[in-house]
């Protein structure tokens, strides 16, 4: 059975989720009680903020450590650390935040790419808008914030993984665009089974623990709809602006309006609407065939009181033997040219 000293040693390296200091540093292990006959361990822990999602994650971490090392049952109580301890470490936390992308002091502008439903090509738009912004001379990064349905690495043909340098994660670069994705941290396409607070923590890490360097634009590929991640982005990045993606089908536009209305209610400016899969050009006749209907993008832009930034046809990128990137359109491709126009409009709106 565990001893009191062993419990203190095992938990000493667990970090306060807000101060980012170990329980040993903050003197956060306040009391340990052992009942050997029942293999029960009770611990009182001091942290900087109680009754939060982060506390729940910390609780799971502590229980897991103790049970792995011999405890049958674990009792946990949390209390707030003394003010002098919080004040001691808080300035360092604030300094780290100021140095991060969320500090608001840098030149990076944030663009979220959202949709009401899946399957409308939101990730394709994110990737190609990023590449087009780069082709226009901008320094660009992508956060694949669609944590359940990550697809950016596959679309860009990324096979490398991020490396850790010191305490920072170095994003992968492809086509001159820096990328970070949940897909880099999941083996063999395993499903992600996480609750809201854990998802929020991962998204926060993408901002604070990644060495982005000097960026002009950081694009966020949001999950479809108006769930936890979209809410977290609205809360974390009050200056973020949005591009809404839809197809020409009226139903897709109707659903996409929800995502747009959410942006408006949280004071996020909508840059415009991108209508994907707008039409198909027949090789036999050369005429446009509107296989998914017409008018969805215009209808959505009217509802959201914005403009249609561009309309993209149904066509694959050109096949290239020496460069695998199934979702990236070449500069001379019809869609590549359309994305170039969209990117130019975005820059004009972001920098006006």
Image (cartoon, rainbow, N blue to C red):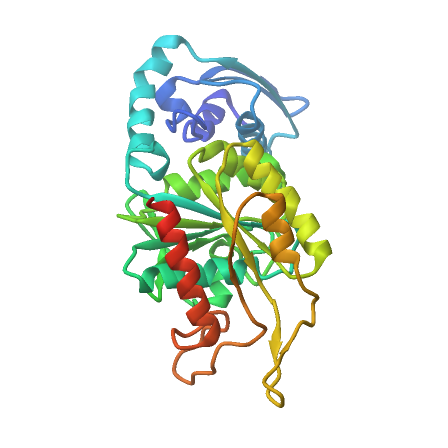
Q: Position of residue 80 (x, y in %)?
A: 48, 13
Q: Farthest residue to the right: give it.
A: 251
Residue drawn where x is 53% and y is 36% of the image: 232
Q: Nearer the viewer, residue 21 or 270?
A: 270
- Residue 317 position (above or below residue 19): below
Location of residue 203 in the rendering, given as x and y in whole percent from the top left corner: 48, 42
Number of marks present in the image shown: 0
Whether residue 170 sits left or right of residue 194 in the image: it is: left
Rendered image quadrant of residue 51: top right
Residue 233 seen anywhere in this rendered image of the structure? yes
Q: Position of residue 286 (x, y in %)?
A: 58, 85
Residue 12, by quadrant, is: top left
Up/down of 264 relative to 59, above or below: below
Q: What residue sits 54% from the left and 76% below the top? A: 316
The N terminus, quarter of image: top right
- Residue 250 or 262: which is nearer the viewer? 250
Q: Residue at x 30, y 31 (%)?
A: 98
In the picture, which quadrant includes the C terminus? top left
Image coordinates for residue 257, horizontal then vertical, percent: 64, 45
Q: Residue lying farthest bottom?
A: 284
At a point 63% along the width and 44% down the height, the residue shown is 303
Residue 68 in sight here: no
* Residue 8 or residue 50, whichever sits in front: 50
């Amino acid at each position: 059975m565990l001893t009191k000293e062993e419990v203190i040693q095992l938990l000493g390296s667990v970090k306060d989720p807000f101060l980012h200091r170990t329980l040993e540093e903050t003197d956060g292990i306040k009391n340990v009680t052992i009942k050997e006959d029942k293999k029960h361990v009770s611990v009182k822990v001091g942290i900087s903020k109680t009754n939060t999602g982060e506390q729940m994650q910390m609780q799971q971490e502590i229980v897991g450590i103790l049970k792995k090392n011999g405890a049958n049952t674990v009792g946990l109580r949390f209390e707030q650390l003394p003010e002098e301890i919080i004040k001691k470490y808080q300035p360092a936390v604030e300094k780290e935040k100021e140095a991060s992308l969320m500090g608001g002091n840098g030149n990076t502008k944030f663009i979220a790419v959202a949709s009401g439903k899946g399957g409308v090509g939101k990730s394709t738009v994110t990737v190609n808008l990023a590449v087009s912004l780069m082709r226009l001379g901008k320094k660009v990064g992508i956060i694949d914030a669609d944590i359940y349905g990550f697809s950016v690495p596959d679309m860009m043909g990324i096979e490398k993984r991020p490396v850790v340098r010191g305490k920072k994660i170095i994003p992968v670069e492809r086509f001159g665009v820096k990328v970070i994705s949940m897909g880099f941290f999941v083996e063999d396409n395993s499903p992600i089974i996480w609750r809201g607070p854990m998802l929020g923590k991962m998204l926060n890490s993408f901002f604070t623990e990644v060495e982005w360097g000097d960026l002009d634009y950081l694009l966020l590929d949001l999950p479809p709809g108006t769930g936890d991640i979209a809410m977290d982005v609205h809360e974390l990045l009050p200056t973020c602006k949005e591009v809404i993606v839809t197809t020409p089908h009226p139903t897709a536009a109707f659903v996409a309006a929800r995502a747009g209305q959410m942006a408006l209610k949280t004071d996020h400016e909508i840059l415009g609407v991108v209508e994907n899969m707008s039409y198909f050009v027949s090789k036999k006749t050369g005429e446009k065939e509107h296989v998914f209907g017409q008018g969805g993008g215009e209808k959505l832009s009217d509802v959201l009181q914005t403009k249609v930034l561009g309309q993209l046809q149904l066509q694959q990128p050109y096949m290239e033997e020496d460069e695998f990137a199934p979702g990236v359109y070449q500069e001379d491709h019809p869609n590549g040219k359309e994305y170039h126009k969209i990117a130019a409009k975005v820059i004009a709106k972001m920098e006006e």
